[in-house]
């Protein structure tokens, strides 16, 4: 699946709010919460000796990507293009 296809599929479940400010804030807060859900089991694994459930970690990373996809969509950004721009920037920074 291309990222642009994933991005479009995410919009199927994105709850519409009447104004963009609310939709963007919802996406940003969702993203922050999901990043926490990625970090917490990693912290417990590396600093508290707990086993890491990699399958669960993968699902949480997917949730992060969901919020990135809908946030990008709110500004008319295409994730395929965004990722290419990021790779181009990294190639210049780290040739």
Image: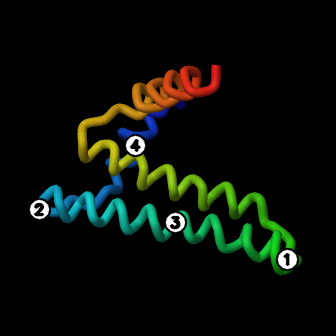
Q: CA distance from mark 2 to mark 3?
A: 24 Å
Q: Which residue is mark 1?
A: 50
Image position of 41 (left or right of 38) = right
Q: Nearer the viewer, residue 61 or 39?
A: 39
**Is the residue marked by circle 3 packed among few (<14), some (14-19), or many (20+) residues within 10 Å?**
some
Circle on res. 59: none
Nearer to us of marks 3 and 4 is 3
Mark positioned earlier in the residue sequence (4 or 2): 4
Q: Which quadrant does the C terminus fall into?
A: top right
Residue 2 visible within the image: no
Q: First in sequence, mark 3 or 4: give its number.
A: 4
**Could you tell me residue 45's position as x and y percent?**
81, 71
Asked if labels 3 and 1 touch by Cβ distance under 8 angstroms, the answer is no
Quote the CA–CA distance across marks 4 and 2.
21 Å
Residue of label 4:
9
Q: Residues within 10 Å of mark 1 (few under 14, many from 20)?
A: few
Pointer 1 or 2: first along the chain: 2
Residue 51, quarter of the rendered image: bottom right
Rendered residue at 88%/77% (across/down): 49
Point out the frontmost of discs 1 and 2: 1
Q: Quadrant of the N terminus?
A: top right
Q: x and y percent of residue 9 in the render? A: 40, 43
Q: Which residue is mark 3?
A: 34
| Residue lying at the far bottom of the rendered structure | 48
Q: Earlier in the sequence, mark 1 or mark 3?
A: 3
Q: What is the distance, in whole Å, between disc 1 and disc 2 at their CAs?
A: 43 Å
Q: Would you name the residue on which mark 2 appears? A: 18
> Residue 21, image x and y in percent?
17, 60
Q: Earlier in the sequence, mark 4 or mark 1?
A: 4
Q: Residue at x 50, y 50 (%)?
A: 65
Cα separation, mark 4 vs mark 1, equals 35 Å
């Amino acid at each position: 699946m291309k990222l642009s296809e994933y991005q479009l599929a995410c919009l199927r479940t994105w709850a519409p709010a009447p104004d963009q400010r609310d939709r963007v804030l919802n996406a940003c807060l969702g993203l922050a919460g999901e990043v926490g859900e990625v970090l917490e089991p990693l912290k417990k694994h590396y600093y508290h000796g707990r086993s890491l459930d990699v399958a669960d970690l993968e699902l949480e990373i997917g949730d992060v990507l969901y919020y990135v996809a809908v946030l990008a969509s709110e500004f008319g950004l295409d994730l395929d293009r965004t990722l290419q721009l990021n790779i181009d920037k990294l190639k210049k920074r780290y040739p």
